[in-house]
Amino acid sequence: MPAIRTVAVFCGSRPGRSPLWRAAATALGEGLGRAGLHLVFGGGRIGLMGAVADAALAAGGRVTGVIPDFLQQWEVAHQGVSELIVTDSMHSRKRRMFELSDAFVSFPGGLGTFDETFEILTWKQLRLHDKPVLICDIDGSAAALCGLIEGAIADGFAPPEAGGFFETVASVPALLARLAELGTVPGGAAALL
């Protein structure tokens, strides 16, 4: 497996009901920045997206936002990132995030986060990639997402091996440790442990 230098984070454009989720997003951004890992995210300045990007930037990290033009026009684009890529559609946004990233993290979020996570898992099922996909279960936030996948397997709509297309981790420290195990570059996430 190639070294992990760039990590895409799928997460909510809203903060959610639990303050634990924003704190975790901040810890994730800080951890990625301190580890020298390049963050790729949905480009928003609001919600958990804004929190993870702000923390990565504050920790000295490189941050690339990828946002569709219509969302940029709604003035939700994060203007303080290292690089802001504007796409013509949601589809091209997901494709660009995929191209830029060595690994994917699914964090608490809503329909957009589910969409991004399921698309990257579908591409894995279709053997379009073999990049790591980590679902971070902050305070039980991943139960619904994982339940849908388990239900599809149990009902025969997804192959049994679909459960192996991703890993679930219970915390940001566990997530950063797993990224280090998967092969981040020297001085990367392992330096946090």
Image (cartoon, grey):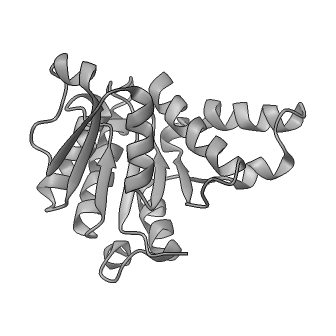
Which residue is painted at 80% across and 32% down in the image? 152
Relative side of 156 to 8, left or right = right
Residue 109, can we see it?
no
Which residue is painted at 75% across and 49% down in the image? 163
Relative side of 130 to 159, left or right = left
Residue at the extreme front of the image, as rendered: 88
Which residue is painted at 51% across and 67% down in the image? 178
Residue 23, can we see it?
yes
Q: Is residue 184 above or below residue 99?
A: below
Q: Position of residue 167 (x, y in %)?
A: 62, 55
Q: Quadrant of residue 11?
A: top left
Relative side of 126 to 183, left or right = right
Residue at the extreme left of the image, as rendered: 80
Instruction: Using the image as rendered, state which of residue 24 and residue 113 is in the foreground.
Output: 113
Q: Quadrant of residue 94?
A: top left
Residue at the extreme top of the image, as rendered: 74
Q: Position of residue 187 (x, y in %)?
A: 29, 81
